[in-house]
Image (tube, rainbow, N blue to C red):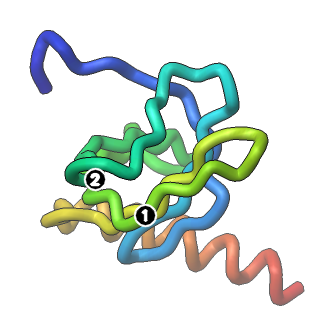
Amino acid sequence: RGPRDISFPGVVLDISMGGLLVTYPRGSEIVFTAIGELPCFEVCLDLPQAHQNLRFDCETRHMRDSGDGIQIGATFSKPDGKNLQELNSYLMSRATVWEN
């Protein structure tokens, strides 16, 4: 992270062991462009049962203007094993809730 890094609050719409879909509301400072390379970014997840925030470096795969905001689909880039284990525990606990 460098001095020019900026944080943008967003909402995770979908998440898996390989990546996520996040949305940023209209009016945020996220810039949607169809020109140039897709950006890389870091996401920080505050999961209820995790002992700490989980951080993942992400590579953007697609961006879409949804009308209400910008949706970004991204894959995790070289994720830390401990963070993946915490994410897996969270996802499995949510799967159990949906089955009941």
Q: Amino acid at mark 1?
A: His
User: Which quadrant of the view contains residue 55?
Assistant: top left
Q: In terms of depth relative to the viewer, which is nearer, 1 or 94?
A: 1
Q: Residues within 10 Å of mark 1 (few under 14, many from 20)?
A: few
User: Pointer 2: residues within 10 angstroms few (<14), some, or many (20+)?
Assistant: some
The answer to whether residue 48 is visible is: no
Lower sequence index among marks 1 and 2: 2
Residue ID at (33%, 68%): 75
Q: Position of residue 10 (x, y in %)?
A: 58, 36
Q: Is residue 94 left or right of residue 59?
A: right
* Residue 42 visible in the current orientation: yes
Quadrant for the N terminus in the image: top left
> Where is residue 63 drawn, in percent x and y?
48, 56
- Residue labelled with disc 1: 62
Q: Give x and y (percent) for residue 79.
A: 20, 63
Label 2 element class? loop
Quadrant containing the C terminus is bottom right
Q: Nearer the viewer, residue 46 or 34?
A: 34
Residue visible at 39% across and 39% down?
44
Above/below status of 45 relative to 77: above
Left or right, 32 with reference to 98: left
Residue assigned mark 2: 38
State the residue at coordinates (55%, 28%). 9
